[in-house]
Amino acid sequence: MKKMILFIVLAFVLSGCGIGERYELSGSSDNWEVFYVVEVSKQNKLLGSGNLEYTGDEPIPETFNYEIKFNNSTSKTTGEQLTSGKMKIGNTKCDLCYFDEDDEIELQIEWDGKTENMILTPNN
């Protein structure tokens, strides 16, 4: 009986750690396309990550910098290497954060002396 109660309590606790909401966003500029996913747990812990692809006509840049802004927080990454024209970006983490289905994300990309800004909007 004790094992059964322990199992029920453990299952209840672990179920509270799951993903509460998942939001998919995308955006593009003259030279870049981005698909980004934000997952918010039931405890308002946020995890964001995505894929970035260079779509420009010039040769693929060797390195680039990017900055992601949302919910009054900023994540900046510099010196990323882009060997195949595609890469994973993000791994943004935030505790006690919120994100709604209509929220947008600002993304700035810098490479080879150029800068492009885009707004990632929800895929509804």
Image: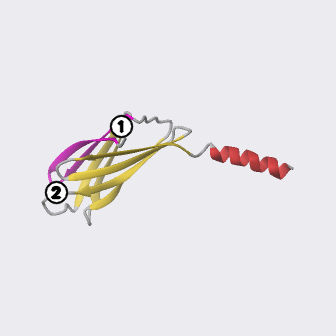
Image position, residue 109 (x, y; %): 24, 48
Left or right, 97 with reference to 63 = right
Image position, residue 82 (x, y; %): 26, 62
In reply to whether residue 3 is colored magenta, the answer given is no
Secondary structure that dominates the magenta span: strand
Secondary structure under the numbered disc 1 in the rendered image:
strand
Q: Residue at x 29, y 58 (%)?
A: 80
Q: Residue at x 29, y 45 (%)?
A: 67
Instruction: Work out whether residue 90 can be spotted.
Output: no
Q: Amino acid at mark 2?
A: Gly
Secondary structure under the numbered disc 2 in the rendered image:
loop
Residue beneath disc 2: 56
Task: Specify few, some or many for label 2: CA neighbours under 10 Å numbering under 14, 14-19, or 20 or more.
Answer: some
Q: Which one is closest to the eye, mark 2 or mark 1?
A: 2
- Residue range in magenta is 102-122
Q: CA distance from mark 2 to mark 1?
A: 26 Å
Quarter of the figure with residue 75: top left
Figure check: 90 above or below 60: above
